[in-house]
Structures are given as C-alpha cells and as structure tokens.
Image (spheres, rainbow, N blue to C red):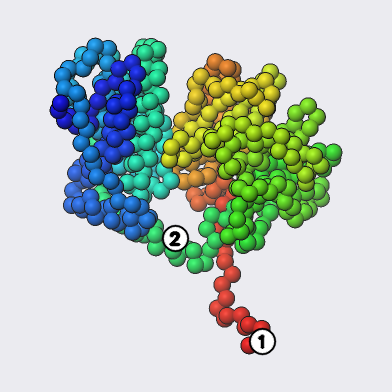
Amino acid sequence: MKIMPLNFLLGEHLRPWQQHTVQYAMDMGFMLYSAGASLAATTCIMPPHWQYALEKSLFKRRPAPPCKALVFQSGAPEAGAVVVDVTGHAAESPVEHKGRELKPFFDGSFDAATLSAVVAAGDMPTIGWAMRQTHDSPWRIVNSAGIAVREPLAQQAAIRLCGERLQQLLARGVEKIDSLNPALLPLFTPVSKIMRVSYVRLAIRQLRQKIAVMALKVFFRLNHWEIALSKRTAIPGDAVWTRLKTPLSHFEADPFLWEQDGKAYVFFEMAVYGGGSAVIAYRRLHENGAVDAPVVALRRPYHLSYPQLFEHEGSTYMLPENRGGALEIYRAEAFPDSWTLVHSFFPGVNAADSTLYNDGQRWWLFTSIATGSVPNWDELYLFYADSPFGAWTAHPQNPVKGTAAGARMSGNIFIKDGVRIRPGQDCRGDYGKQVLFFSIDVLNPEEYRESAMPKPSSLADCAITTGKKARWHTFNQSKNFQVIDYRHLKLRKIRLIPKKRRGA
C-alpha cells in the first residue's frame, strides 16, 4: 500500500472503495487544494486560516474541514482502467499509464487556481472533465457545466459547490465513457496562462458588501418582488407597462396569465414577510386597465410558487412549484378559487419551476432538479409522456442544458412566427438576474437542441427590465396581456418620531 496525492483509478464500474475515494477526493482534498493553489499563486501573504475566519465572520460559514490522506492500492493501473487525475494542476499525472485519462478543467485551464480567480471576480465558473485516449492524443471535453454560485464572494462555499458538481459530472461521464466516440467530442486546448486572485482585494470586497447590505436593510426592503403588466400590441416596442405595486407586508412573483370565459386573471406566488409559507393568489384583470386586489387561490402547509396553468380534456389544471417533496397537479373545481389535488409524482425530487408543454404529439416536462447541495439554478431536465399524468420517461440527454445562463425555466413556452421559444433564467452571479430566450430547434425523444435568441420586441422599451441593477425572472403572455415580475429595493417607512401609544 502507498499514499498517492489525489489520484485514483476507475474500471468499468465504481467499486465501493472507489466511491469512497471519489467522495473524499472531490469533497475535501480537491477543494482545499484549489483554494491553497490560488492563494499560493498570488503575492498576498494572508494565511488560509485567516481567510476561513474572515468568511465565517462575514457570511457565517463553517471553517473548511481538514484534508484527509487517500490510500490506494500499489502497482500499475489495471488494463482497461481510466486514470482520473484530480491533483488540480496542469502537471502530467504521476501515474504511469498508457490508456485513457480524465482530468477536471476550470474555464479553459487545468490549474485549479483559475477556479478561485473566476469565483472571486464574480463570474460564472465553467467546469468539466476532459479526456484523452492515450498520452499522445488530444484532450476532448466529456461534459461541462456553468455553475450558479449563490454567494460569489464566499470563496470556500463556492469551491465546495463546484467540487460537488464536478463529482456529479464525473459520475455521469463514467457511466457513458465506453459508449462515447472521441472523434465526435469537442476538442479542449488548455490555456497556459494562470489566472490569479488577490485575497486582500477579495477581503475588502467582502467587507464592503457586508457593510453596504447592513446599511441598505435600515432603509429598504431588499429583494422585494412586484409584477408589471401590459396589453399585447401588434406594434413592436409599443407596450405600456403598469406596475402592480405591493405594500411592504408581502411580495408577488412568478406571474402566469389565464383567460377564460371572457375574463382575464394573473396567478402568482404571494408571500407575507414573516408570515409563514407562500401561497398562490390571483388578481382579476379588466379591459379598462383596472386590476383587482389579490385573492388567495391555493394554500398548503408548505411553500408554493410558480403556478403554471394548463388545459387538458376540457378542465383547467395547475402545476405549482412546492416544497412538499413531490410534484403536484391540481384541478379547478370552481375556477379560480377552488382547487383539488388530483395527481402527485416524482416523490422525493427537489424540482423547481416545472413547466408542462404539449406539442400536439406528447406532453413535455421541463424542470430543474437539485442534486446534493448544488442549487437547482443551472441544469434543465426534460421528460415526456402521453398525458400530463405520466408515466414520464427521462430524456436520454438529461440534463439537456447545464449552465446558469438560462437553464432554469422562466415561464411558459410560447410560439412566435412559427418558432417555439423557451424563456430561461439568467442566474450568473445572482439569482433571477434577467430572462433569456431560446428557440427550440429540435424536440423529440432522442434529441433536444436549442439556440439563443434576442429578447422579444415587446420588452425592448420596458424601463423596468433595463439598467445594471434591474432584476426580473419570469415572462408570460396570453391572448391579450403579457406580464413580468421584477425585483427592486422597497423603501421602508421610517418614523423619526416614535408613534405615541394609546393611554400614555
């Protein structure tokens, strides 16, 4: 037996000791090494334990766990095995091997210091695995992902998250590695330049952000969501948006439009600050521009949001996102106030913004699924069935999209000029940054392909969605209306003179 630094072997299947090795290598060794490598690559002399203490105090993060040594079997790699090198640097693998080799990459580089530099800069890290057949073969990309980082300035939290996603990508790659045709995989040419990060500048940014947030909380309600509505017009860019302002007591988000029996409604998530779980509410829309006050349509013991509505066999249904542990479909018994649970599926799956679409041949379910502690912001999964009640078949390309730039759904799929358009959330650097639009080019049980497209002209002059600090993450339209939500700072009511108590 001998100790080797973060290198391990994989045969055709992961054995129990290899799974144990993967877990420790990816969750502990690699993530600590990448942080240390980025630190050593700078001229900054801040010790790692100072950085951990700083992040713990600013973001309430636990210090990183100690690195554990990995014990491997001695001897040369067995025939047909794959060498997986997670040392986190660009040097050649210390294992003598003439066969296939897998290596993680970070924004075009094999050096893990690049990961810390990209995260510290507030950009979206792009990570993945590259493979070569022999020592003299070119590197090719097996899979990759653009990671949505919750708190870009919290370095160790971001590195742990990227390490967990790398572990997931490795498991997916190993499952299909023998069926891959290397000639069809994209070439990977690693860059030689190493990105560097100054932890002094990062610490200053962390401290400045924390102070700014503390100051803003005194005067504003942060992350306050409201809805904006407009009538659909045939003239591009001629939409007039009306903001449905909400009080400081609650926010409204995830709007969906529905027109029935000559009446129009907007359904949405409504959450009272400090008042428990969010509910599904609706507002009645009138032709003269008037909008009724919100009315609760569906309340459950757990959080509800993203109320997608659809019609099937003459009945109206709702598929809201929920935190009850499964996807649930409700039927309108007396629209719009009375809903009954009629179907539950995917138990134990943490799915977000699930959206049904019927192309006339079959039903499609677009959803984002959280795996482990990685948020469901940057992967899109696809399933299909003959009816909205299943049975669902997973698409062979799952996840069909793996990037924070538009993977998570932002509303119904709609058709414009014969093109199917999918709205997706841009979560690069922040949740719900904006809505991106993609044309669905191929959609069948064997293949899914889409391409980016410009924002619809009806949103071109919407002042709510423009500007560096603007945030919006839902877009929907019906026959006569279109709707978005937007996030902004809501000014608090500050009393300079305390209100007198009665009886004083």
Horizontal and vertical percent for residue 381? 53, 28
Name which residue type carries label 1.
Answer: Gly
Residue at 39 percent across and 57 percent down: it is: 209
Q: Residue 143 falls in which quadrant of the image?
A: top left
In this rendering, would 292 be left or right of 393?
Answer: right
Residue extending furthest toward the bottom: 504
Quarter of the image containing the C terminus?
bottom right
In this rendering, would 470 be left or right of 247?
Answer: left
Of 488 and 73, which appears nearest the observer? 73
Horizontal and vertical percent for residue 355? 62, 33
In this rendering, would 406 be left or right of 56?
Answer: right
The disc label shown at residue 213, or none: 2
Query: Is residue 119 in view from this perspective?
Result: yes
Residue extending furthest toward the right: 261
Name which residue type carries label 2.
Answer: Val
Residue at 57 percent across and 66 percent down: it is: 492
Mark 1: few/some/many CA within 10 Å (<14, 14-19, 20+): few
Of 35 and 405, which appears nearest the observer? 35
Query: Is residue 485 in view from this perspective?
Result: no
Horizontal and vertical percent for residue 150? 43, 46
Horizontal and vertical percent for residue 430? 46, 46
State whether residue 135 is above or below residue 222: above
Which residue is the site of mark 1? 503
Residue at 62 percent across and 83 percent down: it is: 500
Of 334 and 477, which appears nearest the observer? 334
Q: CA distance from mark 2 to mark 1?
A: 38 Å
The disc label shown at residue 66, or none: none
Assign a secondary structure to mark 1.
loop
